[in-house]
Image (cartoon, rainbow, N blue to C red):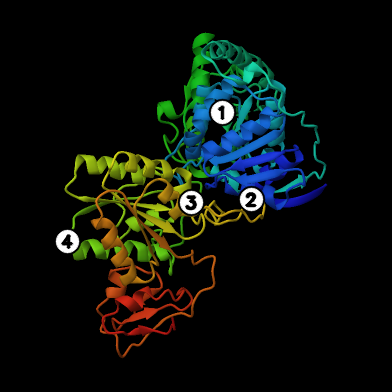
Amino acid sequence: MAKQLLMGNEAIALGAIRAGVDVVSGYPGTPSTEVLETIAKHRPEHTYIEWSINEKAGMEVAAGAAYAGARALVTMKQVGLNVASDPLMSLAYIGVKGALVVLVADDPGPISSQTEQDTRHFAQFAHLPVFDPTSPEEAYELIGAAFRYSEQYHTPVIFRPTTQICHACASIEVVDEINGHAIEGFVKDMKWVIFPKLSYQNHLRILQQERVLAEDFAAFPYNRLGGSRSAVRGIISNGVSTAYVNEVLAMTGDSVRTLSIATPHPFPVKLALAFLEGLTDVLAVEELDPVLEEELLKLCGRYHLPVNIHGKLTDEMNLAGANHFENVRAAIDTFCGRSATDALPAAPAGLPPLPVRPPVLCAGCPHRGSFYSVKAAMQRAKLPAVFTGDIGCYTLGNAKPLDMVDTCLCMGADITMAQGLQRAESGRKHIAFIGDSTFFHTGIPGIINAVYNGTDITVMILDNSTTAMTGHQPHPGTGHTMMGGVTERVHIDKVLAGCNVKCIKHANPLRLEESIAAVTEAVAYPGVSVVIFEAPCIALFKAEPPLRVAAEKCIGCRRCINEIGCPAISLTTEGKAVIDENLCYGCDLCSQLCPVQAIGGVQK
């Protein structure tokens, strides 16, 4: 046993190893990514790990392992659960033989997601237990409990850390011992084949099991009842909100009763009733939605309890976004009859405001060349176009001066949305942008749909040889696996050819004229056409020497700034362009735009 400073995701990973996890699958997505990566780093010899092509595939891989009696873990973020929901709903009915823990990292804020989603609702919808850690320390212990409950009740369970738990750090006693077990193997049985009659019977079974779990969770040690038993006011909380509540109460010394819920579903009714006894008012402090608040309202109505429930439904807690110390402090101050207090000291006078730093494509990013090439090609051809985007670094192509992402919905939607737009408005060109990892994730069905239905669209695949947005994970196009193995690389152009795409062009996005010519030819093709822009992510490969601007040649036209928006280029007080050599990767894009050849320094 040794004490280690761990990020929450690392703590969860080591807790899963301690629990004897056998198979780990998933798809990278902040804030969940480091869990699988940490297990891979510390992988016991018996444990298999993979980045799956998407969350649905990962769920099914883990389910298959659990059918054989293994302890399986699948990881994703909250929007990834949307992709994996089809198998999970059926798994709730069928159950598992070993253990299946579905780690879904929610992103209140949201900090790095398209949507705010509260996975506790999904647990209720699917009739599955959910575990909600309040700290990295608790996450380390609670993941083991999740495996135990899954194995004991033969059900998938959801493990729901949030961003603040995933990325917070704590000093944790790590136990080296691994809970070993034997994997019996798959035993043939009709229960593994889902039929309507079986589903009806299993629905009744899982509803009854929910009641049993609710009884069990009433005595679960991580559901903590605390504070003053004589208090007439109470605070119920979950997740990281519990930490904020405890911090505020430690400062204010308020006499309140507290209840921290680690298993919001099935709700521990008996424990909640003990909490409510003698109280007149309760404040629910939770992320994201009023799940605990609504459970208390149900109990008060069912048992005719004269308790006033306060929270999001009464506009006394923020309705969206993450909780933090300040808003929890203000809510507790009001709840306890004090004026809302600003918990932070005022900023010292005279300090300037922090600069606004919007997200931007990295200096040297090949996506910048891809977007600019398409833009230039369409401008030269004088063709009106709509540009559908996708999830990844290239979503940042929406920012000026590129301004090349008109829509962004979800993974893989660019290709299919372009088809719908084309059917509704055939007078414009419809061009979809998708990354290499996203193409394998959910882009291929869209390609097949376009070919099958004969839709006139052009797809730009931005192949930078990695899953860049989430930390440079491998994918089928890289020829590498998460366990360090070298595998047969899946070639995007061969996949496209297999889908009967007839017009496939390749281009290096850092060679502008070559790229513009490829785009022009592809867009002119009637039907499904594809341009594969191939250039590696600059974060993974050695940069070229930085470029320099010859000040005596620069005419201050600002074309290098106004057309590509590279963060390495700025202006001097004299209005001349200047390149920050600490940021420049020598991609040579700006020098190809300079009308007077004032930019140089790289020999190609």
Q: Name the amino acid, label 4.
A: Lys
Q: Is residue 105 visible?
A: no
Q: Which residue is mark 2?
A: 37
Give the foreground label among 3 and 2.
3
Q: Which residue is mark 3?
A: 437
- State the image coordinates of residue 556 (x, y, percent, origin top left): 26, 81
Q: Is residue 19 visible?
A: yes
Q: Residues within 10 Å of mark 4 (few under 14, many from 20)?
A: few
Do tag 3 and tag 2 residues touch (Cβ < 8 Å)?
Answer: no
Q: Residue at (62%, 21%) from the top-left corner?
A: 192
Spatial separation of the CA atoms under disc 3 and disc 4: 32 Å
Sequence-first tag of 2 and 4:
2
Do tag 2 and tag 1 residues touch (Cβ < 8 Å)?
Answer: no
* 289 left or right, relative to 507: right
Q: Residue at (63%, 51%) from the top-left corner?
A: 482
Sequence-first tag of 1 and 4:
1
Q: Nearer the viewer, residue 555 or 586?
A: 586
Spatial separation of the CA atoms under disc 1 and disc 4: 62 Å
Sequence-first tag of 2 and 1:
2
Do tag 1 and tag 3 residues touch (Cβ < 8 Å)?
Answer: no
Do tag 1 and tag 4 residues touch (Cβ < 8 Å)?
Answer: no
Give the foreground label among 1 and 4.
4
- State the image coordinates of residue 251 (x, y, percent, origin top left): 60, 41
Q: Quadrant of the C terminus?
A: bottom left
| Residue 382, disc | 4
Q: Image quadrant of residue 493?
A: bottom left
Give the foreground label among 1 and 3.
3
Q: Name the amino acid, label 2.
A: Glu
Give the foreground label among 2 and 1.
2
Spatial separation of the CA atoms under disc 3 and disc 2: 17 Å
Q: Which residue is mark 1?
A: 235
